[in-house]
């Protein structure tokens, strides 16, 4: 079932907000942390600029050009699934995953030396987990919401 415009509007607004916050924070990280210094926030949390040319958790170095293709497929599947769900949490999860995916794809498109050769800007460093960004957080939280709402529906 194809989702209606009304069904898609909320998730697309969430996605747009995620992309905006993600890109603004990455711009800040590039300008504030570009000189190599690290900002200690609290406990093990620090802000530390890093670049990821691979896939999740910096794995698959060199596979970066394939990530946007995968992201487009995931976005299409989520939009189709959105038409089959009436859960508001599923819709929020879709918006978060789409926004996070677009945020990271934009880095691959525009932050490199060739089409789809860009590196994703990461800067949130817990020191015991791979360095990540706002888009990554949105994808993880959105994925959890998708799983929980699907389990609850069944």
Image (cartoon, rainbow, N blue to C red):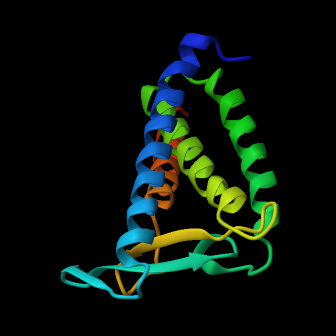
Q: Is residue 125 left or right of residue 96?
A: left
Picture layout, residue 75 above or below residue 153: below
Q: Position of residue 13 (x, y in %)?
A: 47, 28
Query: Which residue is found at the position 61% from the left and 12% from the top?
Result: 5
Q: Residue furthest left?
A: 42
Residue depicted at 57% across the width and 51% down the height: 103
- Quadrant holding the N terminus: top right
Q: How many marks?
A: 0
Quadrant occupied by the C terminus: top right
**Residue at x 72%, y 50% (from the top left corner):** 71
Q: Give how far across and how far down residue 43 sits, in percent.
A: 19, 83
User: How far from the left and from the top, in percent, is residue 94?
Assistant: 55, 37
Between 151 and 43, which is closer to the camera in this rendering? 43
Q: Left of 146 or right of it: where is 125?
A: left
Nearest the camera: 40 or 14? 40
Left or right: where 122 falls relative to 40 = right
Whether 144 is drawn above or below 63: the answer is: above
- Image coordinates for residue 28, horizontal then vertical, percent: 38, 63
Say which residue appears at 67% left-offset and 80% top-offset. Answer: 59
């Amino acid at each position: 079932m194809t989702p209606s415009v009304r069904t898609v509007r909320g998730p697309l607004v969430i996605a747009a907000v995620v992309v905006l916050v993600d890109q603004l924070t990455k711009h800040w990280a590039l300008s504030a942390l570009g000189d190599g210094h690290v900002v200690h926030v609290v406990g093990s949390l620090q802000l530390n600029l890093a670049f990821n040319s691979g896939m999740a958790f910096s794995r698959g170095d060199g596979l970066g050009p394939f990530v946007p293709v995968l992201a487009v497929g995931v976005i299409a599947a989520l939009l189709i699934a959105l038409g089959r769900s009436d859960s508001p949490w599923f819709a929020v999860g879709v918006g978060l995953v789409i926004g996070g995916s677009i945020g990271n794809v934009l880095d691959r498109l525009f932050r490199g030396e060739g089409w789809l050769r860009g590196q994703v800007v990461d800067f949130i460093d817990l020191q015991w987990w791979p360095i990540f960004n706002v888009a990554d957080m949105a994808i993880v939280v959105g994925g959890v919401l998708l799983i929980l709402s699907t389990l609850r529906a069944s």
